[in-house]
Image (cartoon, rainbow, N blue to C red):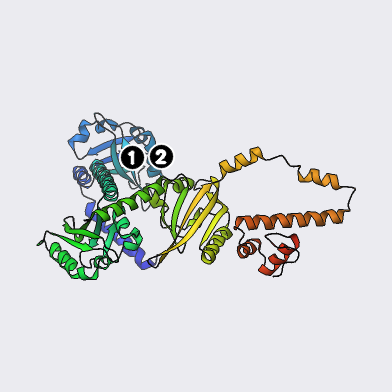
Amino acid sequence: MDSGESSRRIADVDATHSHFAHIEGAAIAQLLGAAADIALVIDGQGVIGDVALATEDMEREGCSDWIGRRWIDTVANDSRQKVEEMLQASTATSPLWHQVNHPVRGSADLPVRYSAVHLGETDQVLAIGRDMRAVSTMQQRLVEAQQSMESDYARLRHAETRYRLLFQVTGEAVLILDADSNRIVESNRTACTLFDLNSQQLAGRCLRDLFDAKDHKRIQTLLTGDTKGSLDEELIVRLAGTKIDVSIAASPVSQHPKHVLVRLTPTSGNASAWLKSRSNVFEVLEKLPDGFVVTDQDGRILTANTAFIDLTQLAIEPQVCGERIDRWVGRHAIDTAVIDKTLKECGRIQNFSTLVRGEYGACTEVEITAVSVFADKTPCVGMTLRPLRRQRETAVSHRPVAPSPSQQMAKLLGHASMADLVQESTEMIERLCIEAALEQTGYNRASAAELLGLSRQALYTKLHRYRLAGFGSDHQD
């Protein structure tokens, strides 16, 4: 601080002293009462010598009885340290502010926010406090309002869950459209079955593109008129690329003016039977004891049955939809790479042994049979996953006990040199690895070579040497 600033501060202190030097004690008490709800005069031993109260409520609660008691003894146990800190910091330029709680008569603790100031050259301390009960009440109301909002939000979430459940399980095909663009925002399972598309494929498509071209204008007129609330009718239109007629009706969603609800009902007996038969197929796949899953060309799951969801240790289908299947399927990345390559080359793969890893550590050996399907220029892959645990247990129980490798090696000791034993063991292990790779890839040699980390020519050479997979001594590559 420079000399100019120091002199200005001294001048301000002198001026203040001159203004308040002649104020009587009663006036000072009134000033403290106006500035604070409670004021305590405390001596050097921490004993309260005087109390000034702003309200009669504090008088009735026994605050005046604090005179003659140590300040620290008038507060709750959790506030004693705060009192000590304020008394120690009372001589500081910037005194501390702390909230303490006073036990009082007839009500809960009295919360007061204090600041302690040392009084001039004496050993007395003036503690000025504000009653915080009004603030505490406001805070309590804020907490109650927040809890009420969270409760309302939970009820809304439960209502939305019930709506979505009803939306999905209803037997009527239902679509929700954007009112401005007439593009599909959401679709239920029955609608997906009717159009033979999943919900991701339907989302964003214009409604009229799903129907025969001759009906486009009528559908557009229906939607335009219904969003204005002027029409309430049903039209008979035909699905694109089929001979199936459906009744279409649209109505605005009052809670969401930008959305339109569209209901579709097959009109002919053949259409109803077709829709019912497709629903039965989905129901059979859903109840299949083996895992069943459909993925897109990139390996992202489009739908899965309950058995597959159980293998992943999850609860509901939406938790797996949109995720890559290699998140759970495959001992390592090469497994899914072999499946993808085999499907691209052959269109199918059968009895491929691999592993399904659950979310919580469970691992299940499975046998995968998969096929690649191209429908409406939208390729997808369907696969079943059959657990091998029971098959393995049955096979092992009937399998004769073979001697261990150490027992076999012990019989050869003394009949062959160590170098010959090592070479024979290496060839045996190499042969077993090749056989295992061929079995795992369904005897697809290209995939087996990739699984073993060999070139195709190197694998063919070893097949020729060990006479595996139809390679005889006279085989020509």
Give the crowd class for mark 1: few <14, some 14-19, many >=20 residues within 10 Å.
many
The residue lying at 56 percent from left, 59 percent from top is 333
Residue 93: horizontal and vertical position, in percent?
A: 37, 53
Res. 139 image quadrant: top left
Question: On the rendered structure, is 175 left or right of 335?
Answer: left
From mark 1 to mark 2, how far is it between C-alphas?
10 Å
Question: Which label's residue is closer to the chain start, 1 or 2?
Answer: 2
Q: Is residue 400 above or below residue 380?
A: above
Q: Is residue 413 above or below residue 224?
A: above
Question: On the rendered structure, is 399 left or right of 249?
Answer: right
Q: Nearer the viewer, residue 243 or 52?
A: 243
The numbered dot on residue 143 is none
The residue lying at 47 percent from left, 58 percent from top is 324
Q: Nearer the viewer, residue 95 or 239?
A: 239
Give the secondary structure at mark 2: helix
Q: Which residue is mark 2?
A: 81
Q: Nearer the viewer, residue 153 or 274?
A: 274
Residue type (three-letter) at the residue carrying disc 1 = Val
Dot 1 and dot 2 residues touching (CB under 8 Å): no
Q: Is residue 386 above or below residue 219?
A: above
Q: Nearer the viewer, residue 108 or 221?
A: 221
The residue lying at 79 percent from left, 54 percent from top is 425
Residue type (three-letter) at the residue carrying disc 2 = Gln
Q: Which residue is mark 1?
A: 100
Question: On the rendered structure, is 357 left or right of 258?
Answer: right
The residue lying at 25 percent from left, 43 percent from top is 148
Residue 167: horizontal and vertical position, in percent?
A: 27, 50
Give the secondary structure at mark 1: strand
